[in-house]
Image: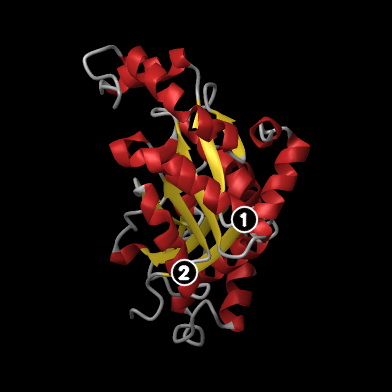
Amino acid sequence: MRAWLARLEPPTEGRIMQAARDAPGEVLIVTGMSGAGRSTVANALEDLDWYVVDNLPPRMLRPLLDLTERAAGAVPKVAVVVDVRGRSLFGDLPEAMRALQADGQVRVVFLDASDSVLVRRFEAVRRPHPLQGDGTILDGIRRERERLTPLREAADVVIDTSSYNVHQLSIRTVELFGEEGAARHTVTLMSFGFKYGLPTDVDLVADMRFLPNPFWNEDLRPLTGEDPAVREYVLGQEGATEFLDAYAAAMRPVLAGYERENKRHSVIAIGCTGGKHRSVVMVRELAARLGDLPGVAVRVTHRDLGRE
């Protein structure tokens, strides 16, 4: 009954996942068919700050729960990936899972896909199915499906990944297990100085050297872009606010696209000659313009400020 209700119908899904979010010390068992996307879900959960344990023997579930309870909230969300790679140990999972579910201590997500899709995925990576033995990939899939039927029927959430690629499955995981209202994308705005070299790990770079340099103003030279006088000077230059407005508008669809593609973090670098005046001001102003985007967290860093 529970698995039938959890076929990702929006009302039922919402009730199940809201209860999961409200539960203290949440523990999630991730299981399902080989090739259905367990690793993708585990990686997405890890990006959501879950503590992920891969290929745990089922008998270790209870000790793990005891450990998380003794951690007193230090590990509030734990995901455990359990599957047929555990071989004979995997047979202990149904009994252990039922006992833990009866205590209300865990929830189970089961990943599934059609036989034809699973065969294509195994052929694409050129790896044998863990249960195929001397038979075919399809033989292994059928053996695994028969073994996992009780787990599927007892799962709280069943996700059919047949039509998902890895990005879509990651996004679905965030939708189901991410905290309500949490940022789905973090953008770091970095100021830097060209004379110290281009940042190496950035997605976009903008050059502020089209604006007059406060360095040549003796009163402003010892100050930085964090000082009001420098901010007023930089923003008062022709083209400064026009650039900010246009660049912020251009970034909105870019960041929305990053989010759709499950790109969790991006870095936008804003440079000037020394990374002390113009770039610092413009990063702060751009952060203010992007700070109201839903689902986006904005961080500011100044790579070369104070380097002189």
57 vs 207, left or right, is left
155 vs 58, left or right, is right
Q: Residue at the spot x=67%, y=37% of the render?
A: 2
Mark 1 falls on what kind of element? loop
Tell me if residue 285 comes above or below residue 250 in the rendering: below
Nearest the eye: 226 or 161: 161
> What is the residue that sits farthest to the right in this orientation?
11
Mark 2 falls on what kind of element? strand
- Residue 109 in view, yes or no: yes
Q: Which mark is residue 47?
A: none
Q: Residue at the spot x=39%, y=27% of the render?
A: 35
Tell me if residue 101 comes above or below residue 211 in the rendering: above
Q: Residue at the spot x=74%, y=46% of the render?
A: 15
145 vs 134, left or right, is right
Q: Which residue is mark 1?
A: 104
Tell me if residue 7 comes above or below residue 27 in the rendering: above
Nearest the eye: 39 or 213: 39
Q: Which residue is mark 2?
A: 301
